[in-house]
Image (cartoon, rainbow, N blue to C red):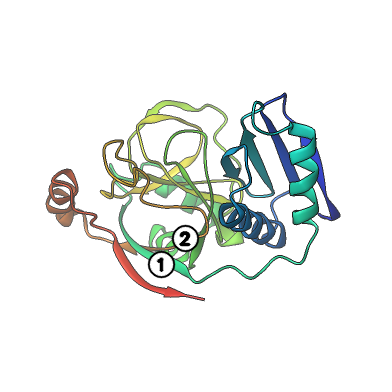
Amino acid sequence: MTYDAPRLLACGDTAFTIEFAAGIEAEAGARVMALDALLAERALPGVLETVPTYRSLTVHLDPLVADPAELGRAVLALAGEALAPLPAARLWRIPVVYGGAFGIDLEAVAVHHGLTPEAVIARHSAPEYRVAMIGFLPGYAYLAGLDPGLALSRRPSPRPVTPAGTVSIGGAQALVASIAAPSGWHLLGRTPVKTFVPKRDPAFLLRPGDRVRFVPTAPEHWDALAAAAEAGETVAELCEAEA
């Protein structure tokens, strides 16, 4: 539930968190992004970095420049104001090869929900997702907007390694993985898009607030798309910004 008033949570002497809700909620996420945009605009002395999540914003600061308690109260006051609407968001169309070696859990997810694999693909690729946060690992994009009919608890035993570019679901969330890593989520497909390249500017392709549409792509197109991505092409299509 979204709180009547945001809460200030201390995080040691170099950070604090402004929390808007107790769970994942669209209203809280919108307020987080609006506050994040406002702090970027105000450039308050001492603020080093802000980290938006589904329901809260963590502010990292330089304690030699700003007093954590004083700055926290100032940001909390801003969070309590009527925050301005967010600007139009970027929309990305991201190719995904579903099933087979690219999405080894597609069949199991389909069986669990009493659907065909084709129906799972259709439901997964139908929504316009919102990038709610980047976290856990560099460039990992957590997406809001998964069809509730596809929601599924995480696997009882995480896999030690899953590929970079994995497109998966866990609980009520969807994910685009940036690098190879352990995961207990259900792997539906994979994208050749490189969402995190350390030497690229910016290193992260997706950012909180962006919108994402998945485009089912035939397996025979994978090699060409992967080669293009390896050569530095974005591969994902950036569409007109939408309100």
Q: Residue 196: x percent and y percent? A: 34, 41
Q: Amino acid at mark 1?
A: Leu
Q: Residue 107: x percent and y percent? A: 41, 48
Q: Do the numbered discs 2 and 1 sit on residues whose CB atoms are within 8 Å?
A: yes
- In terms of secondary structure, where does tag 1 sit? strand
Of the two numbered discs 2 and 1 on the same chain, state the one appearing first in sequence: 1
- In terms of secondary structure, where does tag 2 sit? loop
Q: To which residue does mark 2 refer?
A: 210
Instruction: Name the image quarter holding the N terminus.
Output: bottom right
In the image: residue 212, left or right of residue 4: left
Q: Total marks drawn?
A: 2
What's the mark number on residue 19?
A: none
Q: Residue 169: x percent and y percent? A: 50, 47
User: On the image, which quarter does residue 103 sit in?
Assistant: top left
In the image: residue 43, left or right of residue 191: right
In the image: residue 127, left or right of residue 195: right
Q: Amino acid at mark 2?
A: Asp
Q: Foreground residue, 9 or 171?
A: 9
Q: Image point 40% across, 41% down: which residue?
A: 177
Q: Badge 1 local density, few (<14 within 10 Å), some, or many (20+)?
A: many
User: On the image, which quarter does residue 121 sit in?
Assistant: bottom left
- Using the rendered image of the protein, determine whether residue 21 is visible from the camera's viewpoint: no
Q: CA distance from mark 2 to mark 1?
A: 6 Å
In the rendered view, would you say 65 is above or below 32? above
In the rendered view, would you say 13 is above or below 202? above
User: On the image, which quarter does residue 91 sit in?
Assistant: bottom left
Q: Foreground residue, 45 or 118?
A: 45
Q: Image point 81% across, 43% down: which residue?
A: 73
Q: To which residue does mark 1 refer?
A: 91
